[in-house]
Amino acid sequence: MSKKFRIIANWKMNKTIPEALAFFEQLPKLSNPIYIAPAFTALFACAQKKRSDVILGAQNIYSEISGAYTGEVSANMVKDAGARFVILGHSERRQILGENNSFINKKIKQALLQDLEIILCVGETLSERNAQQTVEVLKKQLTESLFEISSNQLSKIMIAYEPIWAIGTGNAATAQMIQSIHFNLRTYISQQWSQEAAEKISILYGGSINADNILDLIEEPDIDGALIGGAALEINSFTKIIQHAGKLTP
Ligand code: PGA
């Protein structure tokens, strides 16, 4: 496989510590590292496995570094527990917990201060898609979430295009649809930041990825990886995905 196709597993609110560790026991040795974001509570235990082929991350952080924010967890805390990246702006947080672009922007700045890699999720609803507003919606999410982020800082950020109608529905976008959106996003990044940043940035897709449909994505020039929810929870389906993505030691 010529291109560096990234695999990111988002476990969401699943897996206790024993369940997470059992998954790690069964995960075959990988030829290229993959990313896994367990729940906060299992992060440290997973980090103790010290697998050089797995980059661990968090599914969220708060926008401040410490203080009276009951129930929140900061960028340096997740880093301390073993995270090297953080998923920000996931649609479940936007929709269920009311996060907006300016709040996500503050979190991105905190993550950058702690030198965490960032996976910034953007995506449109079904009604926005039907109203042909997809590209406008995505551009607004990028512009506002990445406010005051320099071209240089973009090297620590990956974009995950996750259409909300495709997440957890079994109804993934087609490879052609995704390729065309990613091309638009890359063009927008080259216009707003720089050509170099646009060429280097990884643009991932997420939404009902499985071991079959991932094969079509790998072929597309502007799809640099996949953010996987449901199919990353079960070891057999996940192993097939990473095998298809060329990450298993032959
Ligand atoms: P899914 O979730 O693979 O279960 O659709 C993807 C995501 O929410 O990141």
Image (cartoon, helix red, strand yellow):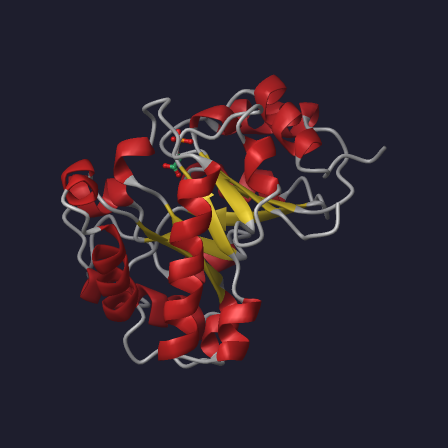
The residue at 53%/22% (across/down) is: 19
**Residue 40 image point, x, y percent:** 41, 42
For this rendering, which residue is in front, 123 or 46? 123
Split into quadrants, the picture shows ligand 1 in the one at top left
Q: Which residue sits furthest right?
A: 250
The answer to whether residue 101 shows anywhere in this view is yes
Write down the quadrant of residue 211 in the picture. top right
Asked whether 226 or 34 is in front, the reply is: 226
Residue shown at 35% from the left, 25% from the top: 171
61 relative to 12, above or below? below
Does residue 168 appear left or right of residue 178 in this picture?
Answer: left
Residue at 35 percent across and 43 percent down: it is 162
Quadrant assignment, res 200: bottom right
Q: Give residue 244's position: percent from left, percent from top.
A: 67, 31
Compared to residue 168, the image places residue 67 above or below, namely below
Residue 191 left/right relative to 116: left
**Quarter location, residue 119:** bottom left
| Quarter occupied by the C terminus | top right
Spot occupied by residue 165 in the image (x, y as percentages of width and height) = 26, 33
Residue 160, visible in the rendered structure:
no
Question: What count of labels does the image hold?
Answer: 0
Q: Is residue 65 left or right of residue 203?
A: left
Establish if 56 lies above or below 76: above
Task: Name the residue at 48% across, 49% down.
Answer: 204
Picture quarter with the N terminus: top right
Residue 212 picture location, percent across and down: 57, 23
